[in-house]
Amino acid sequence: MPFQAATNNRMQPIARWAAIAMGFSIPISTALDNILLFLVLLFLLLSGNYKHKLKSITANPVAMASLALVAILLLGGLYGSAEFADALHYWRKYAHLLLIVLLIPLFEDKPSREYAIAGFMIAMAVTLLLSYLTASGWFPANKIMQGPADNAYVFKLHITQNVFMAFFAYLLAAKALTAPVPWKRTAFGLAAVVAAYNVLFMVQGRTGYVVLAVLLTYFCFRWLRWKGIAIAVLAGIAVAAAGYYGSHTLRGRVNLVATELAAWQAGHGPATSSGLRMDYYTNSLKIIADHPILGVGTGGFGKAYAAKVKGTEMAPSNNPHNQYLLVTAQLGMIGLAVLLYLFYSQWRAAVLLPSQFEQIVARGMLLTIMSGSLLNSLLLDHAEGFFFSWMSGVLFAGLNAARQRNEKNA
């Protein structure tokens, strides 16, 4: 027994370091994500001490809310007209939500959470540097620097990079706000501006624009309360005007959206990016109207959407590019309520985290996913979905540490 206990004690640190390394891999490599996930699962199972792990999970409201969402996704595959293969496809897509639960027992100590966040920030700093080098035109497009000079995405496609970079800018701003010495506040603040510039003027990811605007508004409110909102609005107007008239790329993206929306006609508009999205949204709302309570079941969206567009010029789709519409179409208002409850649990729990920095970051992460999900099904996408689950597990494991500290002081 002593030998087995010693072996188990050595397994959990390996699982923890694999989970920490995921912070670096998520913005960079899907293959590495999967390898590290396997290591986390393997060594977490070998580490034993299941009673403590179960207690950590059941005492954590965010972990339990995520399990509720997983449960309703599983139940959703038991009704509706979806083929088992389609339900299985969606279950696999959402399996990352279990990562929240798995990581809770691994990140109860503050240094582990700090290392994890640092790993993500290092990966994004590398991405930012390579993005600027790509935009300079010094390097031809290659397997790492994928984008052209006027759309300088690197490891991930432009939508994903811009979402992550907007959050990275927010992370840097949070570091600036909470740094203990002036020179660090200045350095982090300037770095945040450099990252925000990359989002707005160097990469063509419109979801990132929305996420950055939401994060800027919340950060200014957190910093200066209602005065901060006024500053954020004025800054947003100034940046938007400067960007529109000073950046050919940004102006072109804005004008393209306006042109596409003006040309869209329900059911037979031109097949533009914005036009397709409008088709997705309107048809998804029709599916929801037909199945408002329970939806069409997990995996049933593709078949239901195909039925809606049959006999029209519109193409079938299995993704409405809106997380809220996708969940509601498949799981009804009940499913949407469970998803929103998970977000609510995270928002409410964020103020209980041990440090001001973690509180700011947790709400920023949540706002990133909530705002980005208006334009994309982020929880369905690998990188964004893993980011949400991994970051949630890392940050909200701090709830257990805060609770234990309060119990000792009581």
Image (tube, rainbow, N blue to C red):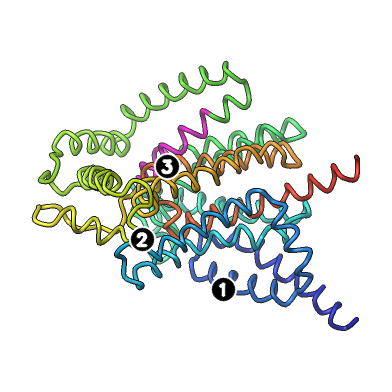
Do the residues bearing badges 1 and 3 touch, measured as CB atoms within 8 Å? no
Q: Nearer the viewer, residue 365 or 341?
A: 341
Q: Is residue 43 above or below residue 248?
A: below
Whole-Å distance between the Cαs marked 1 and 3?
A: 28 Å
Q: Quadrant of the N terminus?
A: bottom right
The residue labelled by disc 2 is 141
Q: Locate residue 321 relative to residue 393 in the image: left or right.
A: left
Query: What's under tag 3, amino acid-wise?
Result: Gly
Q: Nearer the viewer, residue 78 or 211?
A: 78
**Does the segment drawn in magenta span residue 215?**
yes
Whole-Å distance between the Cαs marked 1 and 2?
A: 27 Å
SS at circle 1: helix
Q: Along the polypeptide, which appears first: circle 1 or circle 3? A: 1
Q: Along the polypeptide, which appears first: circle 1 or circle 2? A: 1
Give me the disc on residue 35. 1
Q: Is residue 80 above or below residue 213?
A: below
Query: What's under tag 1, amino acid-wise?
Result: Ile
Q: Nearer the viewer, mark 3 or mark 2?
A: 3
Query: What's under tag 2, amino acid-wise?
Result: Ala
**Does the segment drawn in magenta span residue 293?**
no
Number of residues whose C-alpha sits closer than 10 Å to that of mark 2, classed few (under 14), some (14–19) or many (20 or more): some
For the record, the magenta segment spans 199-217
Task: Tell me what residue is drawn at x 51 percent, y 28 percent.
Answer: 217
Q: Majority secondary structure of the magenta segment?
A: helix
The residue labelled by disc 3 is 208
Task: Tell me what residue is drawn at x 22 percent, y 38 percent.
Answer: 256
